């Protein structure tokens, strides 16, 4: 199971940005950072100094990002971290490894992600577990409720489902463009809603 500290090292996200504190802006319930990330006031970023968000991403209420464990968490552009999702750098014999989430990637609600890397243009469904040190390559879809075993490598353009997760199909090559367009459209729609509040 992922590390879920309850100590005072957990920082509420109101103090987290790439460049230090930011003004509370945007819609009700979210803070907009200098890089145009929207982070819910109900999300928790542990060890904010080790959490890097490249910009224009959304972190939903109840999400937890663990940067306090000695390894960074790096999140690309146009990513979405779902409600109640947990991102935690994976353990290795030599300590914690960095966790990288590529651009245009969506992590579904209530997921537990201990993967070493989740590629760009990946859709992770709800209630999924990505085991320690697994690697999900670019342009993949992980179906709802899937459990990907530790140290598994998922090839590009795969559709994965089951417990343990197995490749059950593949995405068309056009997914590389469609998933980027989708993440941009979802972010734009989210921002319009926040600005309307």
Image (spheres, rainbow, N blue to C red):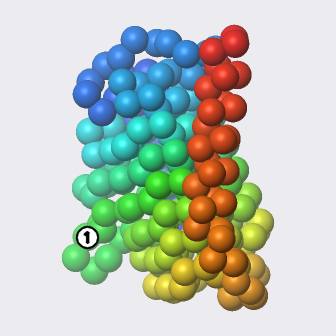
Of all residues, the one furthest to the left in this rendering is 94
Q: Is residue 193 visible?
A: yes
Question: What residue would you read off at disc 1?
Answer: 95
Q: What x and y, as percent, mark residue 189?
A: 69, 32
- Quadrant containing the C terminus is top right
Numbered label tally? 1
Q: What x and y, as percent, mark residue 119?
A: 48, 67
Q: What x and y, as percent, mark residue 190?
A: 66, 31
Q: Is residue 5 visible?
A: no
What kind of element bears circle 1?
A: strand
Of residues 102 and 91, the one nearer the viewer is 102
Task: Identify which residue is drawn at 33% across, 37% down.
Answer: 48
- Quadrant containing the N terminus is bottom right
* Mark 1 neighbour class, 10 Å CA radius: few under 14, some 14 to 19, many 20 or more: few
Task: Identify which residue is drawn at 36% across, 53% down.
Answer: 73
Q: Image check: 50 left or right of 166?
A: left
Of residues 194 and 189, the one nearer the viewer is 189
Vertical relation: 69 (above or below) 32:
below
Q: Image check: 36 left or right of 178?
A: left
Task: Identify which residue is drawn at 39% across, 61% down.
Answer: 100
Of residues 12 and 183, the one nearer the viewer is 183
The quarter holding residue 10 reads: top left
Vertical relation: 2 (above or below) 66:
below
Q: Image check: 74 left or right of 127?
A: left
Task: Identify which residue is drawn at 26% across, 39% down.
Answer: 49
Q: What x and y, as percent, mark residue 169?
A: 74, 86
């Amino acid at each position: 199971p992922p590390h879920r500290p309850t100590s005072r090292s957990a920082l509420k996200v109101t103090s987290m940005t790439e460049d230090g504190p930011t003004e509370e802006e945007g819609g009700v319930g979210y803070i907009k950072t200098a890089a145009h990330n929207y982070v819910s006031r109900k999300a928790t970023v542990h060890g904010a100094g080790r959490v890097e968000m490249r910009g224009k991403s959304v972190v939903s209420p109840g999400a937890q990002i663990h940067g306090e464990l000695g390894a960074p968490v790096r999140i690309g552009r146009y990513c979405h971290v779902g409600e109640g999702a947990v991102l935690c750098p994976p353990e290795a014999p030599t300590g914690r490894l960095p966790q990288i989430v590529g651009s245009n990637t969506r992590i579904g609600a209530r997921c537990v992600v201990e993967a070493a890397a989740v590629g760009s243009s990946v859709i992770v469904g709800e209630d999924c577990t990505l085991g320690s040190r697994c690697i999900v390559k670019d342009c993949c879809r992980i179906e709802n409720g899937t459990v990907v075993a530790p140290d598994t490598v998922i090839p590009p353009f795969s559709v994965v489902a089951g417990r343990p997760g197995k490749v059950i199909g593949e995405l068309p090559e056009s997914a590389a463009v469609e998933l980027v367009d989708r993440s941009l459209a979802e972010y734009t729609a989210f921002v319009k809603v926040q600005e309307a509040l």
